[in-house]
Image: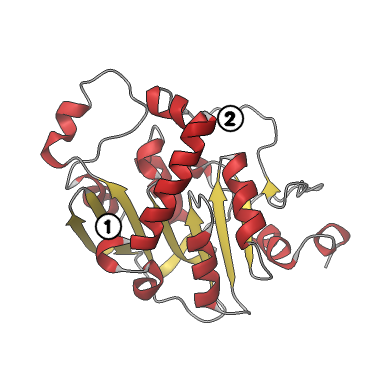
Amino acid sequence: MDGVTATLPPALAAAQKLLADPPADPDISRGYLDLLGAQISDVPENTGLIQALWASPIGSLLYDNAQTVARRLLTAWQQPTEWLDLPAGGTALDVGCGPGNVTAALGRAVGPEGLALGVDISEPMLARAAAAEAGLNVGFLRADAQRLPLRDASVDAVTSIAMLQLIPDPATAIAEMVRVLRPGRRIAVMVPTAGRAASLIRLLPNGGAHAFGDDELADTFESLGLSSVRAKNTGTIQWVRGVKAA
């Protein structure tokens, strides 16, 4: 173990070994590993009314509460840990982790010898997650979902809950999740869906969120070579899951 890794908390030290380009001087001053710092990304960001709302103090509180409710309900397939078939000692990734409670559930599922990582771009969210949920095998990274910092085929499961609608190119983020997933392993995502109205909603002025049609995510999964793709709607919530080819 090198000197830099030795100074990191156990979960972040393990995360550092999975990074495609680990920083020589990692910033963990806020309790999470910040891989963006003050840099300006060349990856597009969403703008619009919804993004402006989330950036406000009231919006942040509303988003946190909404995420907490969604993550408690987890709708039709219950906890994603039940379907992801996580191996003891494996590595799980929660993309758009928000307050981190699902990341912590993944940590419990993989056990003390495993690793659960939450990725988000929001500094306030990550600070809350790190304060409330970080542990020996649970750590948080600040990174862009459209350019995940992990090596190819480095995790055993990926989940993402109520995040993909908030970024400009959901298909790019899904491709990144599939890239870091090991062959034969599983991915499950949850999004709000607008069904047949999605195409009409997209004609409206930019509100800062993507409107998903009923078949859109499943089609994206299949286009990326995932098998056993299933989509299930409950009201305006949709879960989509698939398995990466071995």
Disc 1 marks a residue whose amino acid type is Val
Q: Are marks 1 and 2 in contact (CB under 8 Å)?
A: no
Q: Residue at x 33, y 61 (%)?
A: 73
Left or right: 191, with 68 as reference point: left
Q: Which residue is mark 1?
A: 240
Q: Position of residue 178 (x, y in %)?
A: 41, 55
Which of 37/65 is in front? 65
How far apart are labels 1 and 2 at the CA level?
A: 28 Å
Which of 191/21 is in front? 191
Which of 52/181 is in front? 52
The mark nearer the N terminus, 1 or 2, is 2
Local packing at callout 2 (Cα closer than 10 Å; few below 14, some 14-19, many 20+) is few
Disc 2 marks a residue whose amino acid type is Ser
Q: Residue at x 38, y 43 (%)?
A: 164
Q: Quadrant of residue 15?
A: bottom right
Q: Which residue is mark 2?
A: 41
Q: Secondary structure at mark 2?
A: loop
Q: Position of residue 47 (x, y in %)?
A: 43, 23
Q: Position of residue 62 (x, y in %)?
A: 44, 40
Q: Position of residue 211 (x, y in %)?
A: 25, 36
